[in-house]
Amino acid sequence: MLITLLLALLLPVGQTTEAISDDALFLVEEFERYYPRQEHPAQRREAILTLRDASSLRATVALMPALEDEEYLVRRAAIDVLCGYTDPAAGQFLVEGVLEDRKLKKNDRLVAAVAEVLGGMRYEAALGRLQALLEHDELSVRLGATNGLGRMGRVEAVSSLAWLIDPDNGAEEALQVAAVRALEQIGNVDAARPALLVALARGSKPVQIAAVAAAHALPHKDLIAPLIELLDESRDPRVAEDAHGVLVDITLRTFPDTKSDWQTWWLRAVATWVLPDAELVKAARARLATQGSKYATGKSFQGIETKSDNILFVIDVSESMNQPFGDPERLEQSGRTYKSNQRLDIVKEELIGTIEALPETTAFNIVSFATAVEHWKKRPATANVLNKSNAQSWVDDLEPLGGAATTFRARAGLAGGGGEAVGQTNTHLALMTAFGEEVEKKKKRKRAKPRELVTELSDPIDTIYFLTDGEPTVGVTTDMNEIRDEVRRLNGFRGVQLHVIYVGTHGGGQFKLLAEENGGVFVSVGS
């Protein structure tokens, strides 16, 4: 590759072999031969991951082409691998060989990736250069520098990040979100506090969601009052939901989710109150993680309540949903009775009840999926009496696909293309659809359209309930690690809360991670 040859010219004599073992050198050399020939992004990504333990200047040079790969997830893999490298010579090379090179520093995609890598390497000599890149013309470069400053963890970067967060300075919303997260990574509570106060009080919805999460990681007495202010649901119910959860967590108080109750307590307690012991907070967080969200909202599905006014339900109707619920005793203990113990029948009853209880302030939609997907509506609809009645009828008509139950749904558009069985589990397609991403159908050309980091924040949906009974069996990818990466790409700057209800009898670990990575609750009800 041309770029590898150009960069190799910058290496000090003898540096390529002294800092790398024979085994690692063999992998690097094989990578250099293998990577350029791979047309499928998954193969390129897999090759990159083999160099995780090859920390060296030589491996860094070999990975340079991957940092400008046309596929975002391939670049993401290269960034994550290089962020784990510790060789100072590699950091020096990235600064002098890329950021200071007359031609390469004009390559925005490469510079953005290198900026984040230098932070992940904690190459502190690059601190000033990363701060300077915050003024770059290209958003992707500014994002890379912001992420790099967060990964580097230096308190000296806080003032630059705080400037981005102040909405008066005109930084893009995605950049403000990234700056808040960078402050959380740096982890200095006192330094971050002024910027977090601004984000909580004046930030947009995604910025406030990020700031509430940062307040959870960096608790401070001064953040209690602005968190209480966010309980005013007239601002945004979803932000209020997050703020209440953090207040309960960091204060160990269990007041209702109303602003007045918390204000009354805080007026009495503010003069003498101190943060609870870290171990007590840690234990409370572990307890809350198993309980899920609890609010007096009337909006609940499978025991997970929400304040959100913008909800999407994604329901698995694959053939396996025809099986009986895994643990009849648990159904008896719940005190609920159902017309049938079939998985989908139980889900339908629960969802119909959830829809009935939605207040008219709620906008909602439903997606069912198996091999393909079907929408109830093209876009979220208001929960008025007519829409709720129609949605309930639509849900009541759902049947597990596969076998004799395929005919009706196949006519509705759920039949898989290319001869695929209609009742398989296309988790990737379902989640991409939930986040508004069009999945390209099979075409004759060899490459799919490159997928980039999503920085537009226009979709109103902020809460997703995703119900499934098993691992993916069909789709663009059935690798849950890749699917989780795709969701992170789509949700990176949106703050959508993704709750996962798992009704399978085995497994579920990857879906638990999926929920945790996206601010949601994982509930296993099948076993």
Image (cartoon, rainbow, N blue to C red):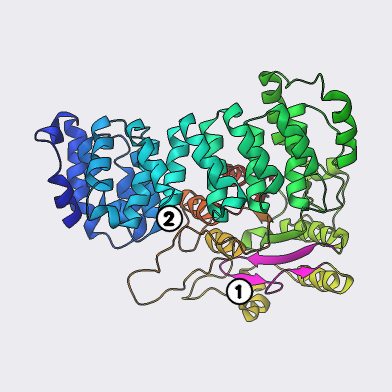
Residue located 51% across and 32% down the image: 186
Q: Is residue 361 above or below residue 324?
A: below
Q: Is residue 234 above or below residue 156?
A: below
Residue located 25% across and 46% down the image: 100
Taking the image as drawn, is residue 400 in sight? Answer: no
Residue 181 pos. (x, y %): 55, 41
Element type at mark 1:
helix
Q: The N terminus appears in which quarter of the rendering?
A: bottom left
User: Label 2 belongs to which residue?
Assistant: 140
Mark positioned earlier in the residue sequence (1 or 2): 2
User: How many numbered marks appear?
Assistant: 2
Residue located 22% across and 53% down the image: 102
Q: Residues within 10 Å of mark 2 (few under 14, many from 20)?
A: some
Residue 137 pos. (x, y %): 41, 57
**Magenta run includes residue 464:** no
Residue 348 pos. (x, y %): 78, 61
Q: Is residue 350 above or below residue 218?
A: below
Q: Amino acid at mark 1?
A: Leu
Q: Which residues are magenta?
A: 361-382
In the image, is 275 to the left or to the right of 167?
A: right
User: Label 1 belongs to which residue?
Assistant: 414
Q: Amino acid at mark 2?
A: Ser
Taking the image as drawn, is residue 479 in sight? Answer: yes
In the image, is 25 to the left or to the right of 110?
A: left
Mark sitting on residue 259: none
Residue located 85% across and 71% down the image: 389
- Residue closer to the observer: 402 or 201: 201
Are the two marked residues, 1 and 2, in contact with CB atoms closer than 8 angstroms? no
- Residue closer to the observer: 465 or 268: 268
Quarter occupied by residue 356? bottom right
Residue 140 pos. (x, y %): 43, 55
Q: CA distance from mark 1 to mark 2?
A: 37 Å
